[in-house]
């Protein structure tokens, strides 16, 4: 089932994590070089803060005042720079690791209760008998009604080897069911796979965590085992609705399909601050055809992969224009005070192209029409629509991004089925398909 509202971890929008003293020393050096005017402005901030603290009509929370002031400064730079308080920083590290102490269930919210979409195989929840469709209405004696999905998920996570008691409603059961589960290390599945039409490997990458490259290797190996390496027609890599993640994982995923050449380069404020990432020999797909699916929900690390494989002509990019987030965020630890997420560079595809506020233009445009109930409710996603975004070198009036909708049922997925037809030789690439999304698909 395609990802349409599951919750295991939050979305990660950063593309690089850089921790350590070196980065902090650089920032301090820059601060020492500031002029007298800068320090006068800082003195003004201190004066305003003191007047608000002492004279506002109600006593303000000083910690929140400072945090909001810092975030105001950072968000004025671009939409992706921000301050992470200690809790947010901890959550972000959980997301990037791709593992946490928990139960092993994918959940959503339904009628104010937590609904189990699927227990993950081999996890404590699956072994304790939690089933898809179960409705969790109590967590350790506390009612779920009134909690947000985020709050409920946080209550279910916790230290490894600690117990948690759930009360669930199950269709067909005579009454509530009580289940005690011992938390364990849960690895988030950033990669899912299946075989389509008996001969095409379908690999869905929903985020780029520390587990993604190993998940991709495992998926390809299992597809080869199930189909037989000689019988595989090709692979479809689904990056739709993938908001990005770790830069090194985007590089590793690209490298899995490339034998040589540049994958991506990052460039900072200094013209000499350029880092290039190169592919190493070895193609996990064995040279078989690859199609990459993208849409307006494909951002950041997803665009690195799509751009690298497109420029090297290793894959056909199919779908609609991607989000257009071509900036790199570095995470700078601030001791016990959290961290700073700061945009420090832009990335460029191997053809020396910046996709900032432009996006990846697919080789074959395949529009996925919205169902009637979503028309007017789902807007096109794109960096160029974000207030305060960094202007892109190739940004134009068309802007970046497109619709970010994927049907939950594969049979309704026009983009996926067109890609399958291409790999199986049932269709030829026509550049734009269909010309009118309201017309019936050709046979």
Image: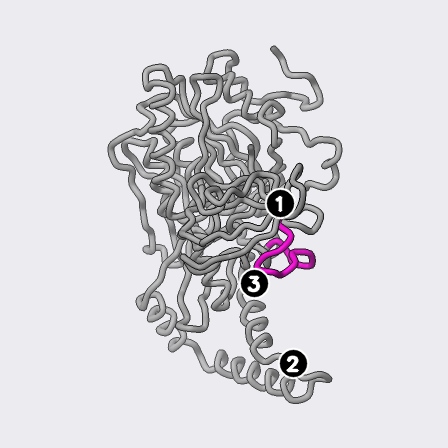
Q: Nearer the viewer, mark 3 or mark 2?
A: 2
Q: Magenta span has 420?
A: no
Nearest the eye: 215 or 23: 215
Q: Earlier in the sequence, mark 1 or mark 3?
A: 3
Q: Position of residue 355 (x, y in %)?
A: 48, 42
Q: Secondary structure at mark 3?
A: helix
Q: Residue at x 51, y 22 (%)?
A: 419
Q: Which residue is mark 1?
A: 115
Q: Earlier in the sequence, mark 1 or mark 2?
A: 2
Q: Position of residue 282 (x, y in %)?
A: 26, 31
Q: Which residue is mark 2?
A: 60
Which stretch is magenta?
Answer: 136-149
- The image quadrant that residue 398 belongs to is top right
Q: Position of residue 436 (x, y in %)?
A: 68, 22
* Quadrant where the image shows the N terminus: top right
249 sits left or right of 300 in the view: left
Q: Position of residue 155 (x, y in %)?
A: 55, 59
Q: Earlier in the sequence, mark 3 or mark 2?
A: 2
Q: Nearer the viewer, mark 1 or mark 3?
A: 1
């Amino acid at each position: 089932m395609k990802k349409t509202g599951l919750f295991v971890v939050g979305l990660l929008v950063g593309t690089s994590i850089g921790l350590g003293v070196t980065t902090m020393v650089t920032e301090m050096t820059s601060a020492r070089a500031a002029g007298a005017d800068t320090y006068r402005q800082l003195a003004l901030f201190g004066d305003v803060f003191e007047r608000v603290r002492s004279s506002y009509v109600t006593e303000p929370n000083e910690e929140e005042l400072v945090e909001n002031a810092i975030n105001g400064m950072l968000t004025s730079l671009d939409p992706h720079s921000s301050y992470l308080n200690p809790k947010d920083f901890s959550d972000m590290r959980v997301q990037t690791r791709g593992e946490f102490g928990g139960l092993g269930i994918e959940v959503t919210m339904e009628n104010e209760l937590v609904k189990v979409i699927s227990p993950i195989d081999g996890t404590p929840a699956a072994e304790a008998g939690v089933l898809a469709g179960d409705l969790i209405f109590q967590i350790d004696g506390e009612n779920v009604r009134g909690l947000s999905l985020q709050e409920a998920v946080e209550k279910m996570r916790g230290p490894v080897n600690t117990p948690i008691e759930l009360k669930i409603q199950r269709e067909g059961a005579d009454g509530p069911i009580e289940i005690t589960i011992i938390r364990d290390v849960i690895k988030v599945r950033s990669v899912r796979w299946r075989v389509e039409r008996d001969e095409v490997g379908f690999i869905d990458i929903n985020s780029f965590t520390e587990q993604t490259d190993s998940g991709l290797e495992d998926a390809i190996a299992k597809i080869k085992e199930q189909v037989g390496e000689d019988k595989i027609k090709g692979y479809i890599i689904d990056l739709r609705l993938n908001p990005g993640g770790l830069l090194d994982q985007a590089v590793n995923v690209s490298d899995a399909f490339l034998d040589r050449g540049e994958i991506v380069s990052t460039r900072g404020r200094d013209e000499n601050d350029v880092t290039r990432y190169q592919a190493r020999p070895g193609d996990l797909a064995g040279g078989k055809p690859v199609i990459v699916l993208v849409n307006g929900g494909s951002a950041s690390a997803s665009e690195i992969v799509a751009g690298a494989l497109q420029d090297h002509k290793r894959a056909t990019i199919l779908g609609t224009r991607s989000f257009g987030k071509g900036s790199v965020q570095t995470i700078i630890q601030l001791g016990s005070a959290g961290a700073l997420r700061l945009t420090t560079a832009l990335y460029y595809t191997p053809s020396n192209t910046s996709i900032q506020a432009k996006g990846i233009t697919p080789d074959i445009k395949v529009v996925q029409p919205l169902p009637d109930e979503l028309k007017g409710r789902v807007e096109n996603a794109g960096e160029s629509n974000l207030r305060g975004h960094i202007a892109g070198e190739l940004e134009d009036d068309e802007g970046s991004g497109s619709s970010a909708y994927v049907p939950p049922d594969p049979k309704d997925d026009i983009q996926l089925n067109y890609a399958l037809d291409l790999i199986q030789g049932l269709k030829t690439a026509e550049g734009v398909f269909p010309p009118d999304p309201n017309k019936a698909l050709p046979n």
